[in-house]
Amino acid sequence: MHTDLLFTGGPVLTPEGRTASAVAVTGDRITAVGHDEVLELAGPRTEVVDLAGRLLLPGFQDAHVHPVPAGLELARCDLTGTTTAEESVAAVRAYAEAHPERAWILGGGWSMEAFAGGTPTKELLDAVVPDRPVYLPNRDHHGAWVNSRALELAGIGRDTPDPADGRIERDASGEPTGTLQEGAMQLVGRLTPPATAADRLAALLHAQRHLHALGITAWQDALVGDFLGMDDPAEAYRTAAREGTLTARVVGALWWDRARGAEQIPELVEKRRESSHGRFRASTVKLMLDGVAENGTAALLEPYLDRCGCATANRGKSFVDPSQLPKYVTELDALGFQCHFHALGDRAVRDALDAVEAARAANGPGDTRPHLAHLQVVHPDDVPRFARLGATANIQPLWAAHEPQMDELTIPFLGAERATWQYPFGALLRSGARLAAGSDWPVSSPDPLQGIHVAVNRVEPGGTGPVFLPEERLDLAQALTAYTAGSAYVNHLDDTGRVAVGALADLVVLDRDPFAGPPEEIARTAVALTYVGGERVYAAE
């Protein structure tokens, strides 16, 4: 029987390494992997792809991403890529002048290091948009920049108390300065006009095209629900799945409302049932345990330091009651939900692992595959617990490098010892932990090859500065495995993530073989072709 699609003439990355040079695909599955003998399966209607020395590998999978908000931001006031206050303000001015019909100026993606202390002021926005409210989350979506009109509409003033899960930045007199952290974002975010269903669907399809162009064939959407003014992508996924326009395979992580408790679990069960269709499965629950280190909301075991290196009273925030978390996770686990934890600080990581341990003790071994995302600070005592508990380490490699947000807004406030506990990819792998990988886009670039470059080099693409904790580097094969088989595991897509007979033909052809060049050139690699189930979804021009 002749095959439908045949790849030949280049290295093929199999679970055993670069051990093949030809792959045959029939229908949506791989039917042969080998060398010249595979060529005999070609027929008159077989599509033959000459790899010409380029690497063929499994499709990349992003284990933690937000495509719909990313797509919406691209269509709004997109501050991604601005690196100074002047650039950010100029971009806001240009967008506002180009869209006089917009009642609100929405978008986001600004960088904390562009502003003193990571907190931009309302006066900067007032100077360019004095008459309309402005609401712009930063690139990590843990803080928002607003103008005076937005504060006025929300009734935020000197006497407005901080919400329990957030902080209003203030000047010495107590006046709000224009930056809202964590839960305080919602004070304005809840007033913003929601995107229409058509807007959300268009954003999803735009994001999907972009992700396919980066070789991504599947992902886990890390927030399906309502949170801090972000648009719930569930309807967009359901529509795309039913209409057949969802070409990727997607797992949705249903949002755990951190203001509520176990009473929401029956609602999550119903959302899982009603949302899952075709290539979209809402089989996971996202529990956001803490914030981020740059604004002092990541949950730490010991206090943050001040600029003088002295301990403060701040240990960050726990958004879900640690005393109740084991009960919640145990019940979710018993119902077959995967738990996807946002755990950035070492206290949040420990709380998540304690909850997984409680679920394992109560329910016995299962196949729910819990995973902890971000893992910026991990206490060394907790590193071996990942393998012991079967908890996957979901890493965002692009963050593991020296750059202003790390060097100016993080390391000084962690101190010398704790700074060495950051992003311990190598230590986790050596301890036997399984690694998955993702981007957190639009927080950072969704390009897996950029993330792989940093995982291997611990230096930003194009960077020449010092290596960030070199002992935590991965080799190229390990980093590729995290972005393929590792993420496929957490997505319960067991017939993807590998080039093997019987696996789904979710495949990527790169424009070169990165194994053939030096590690510092990995980021120069690009995607040439992307296939999902044997169907081509992207080809470079």
Image (spheres, grey):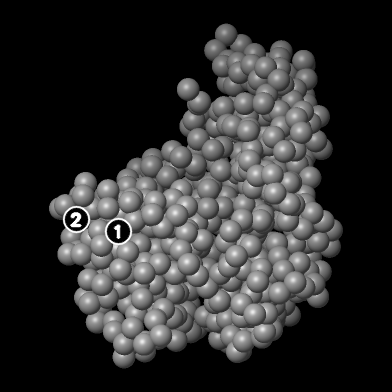
Circle 1 sits in a helix, a strand or a loop, which is it?
A: strand
Q: Residue at x 51, y 61 (%)?
A: 113
Residue receiving disc 2: 102
Q: Give the left or right position of residue 39, taking residue 269 as reference.
A: right
Q: Give the left or right position of residue 52, taking residue 95 as reference.
A: right
**Circle 2: residue type:** Arg
**Circle 1: residue type:** Leu
Whether label 2 touches label 1, CB < 8 Å: yes
- Marks 2 and 1 sit apart, C-alpha to C-alpha, by 9 Å
In the image, 436 versus 400, the foreground residue is: 400
Q: Is residue 485 visible?
A: no
Name the spot of residue 132 as percent of width and height, x first: 19, 64
Q: Residue at x 50, y 38 (%)?
A: 212
In this view, the residue farthest toward the top is 44
Name the spot of residue 202 as percent of width and height, x first: 32, 45
Name the spot of residue 69 as percent of width and height, x first: 40, 55
Name the spot of residue 133 as percent of width and height, x first: 23, 66
Residue receiving disc 1: 106
Q: Quadrant location of residue 119? A: bottom left
Quadrant of the frame with the N terminus: top right
Count neighbours of disc 1 (C-alpha within 10 A) and say few if under 14, some if 14 to 19, many if 20 or more.
many
Q: Residue at x 65, y 71 (%)?
A: 412
Q: Which mark is residue 347?
A: none
In this view, the residue farthest toward the left is 101
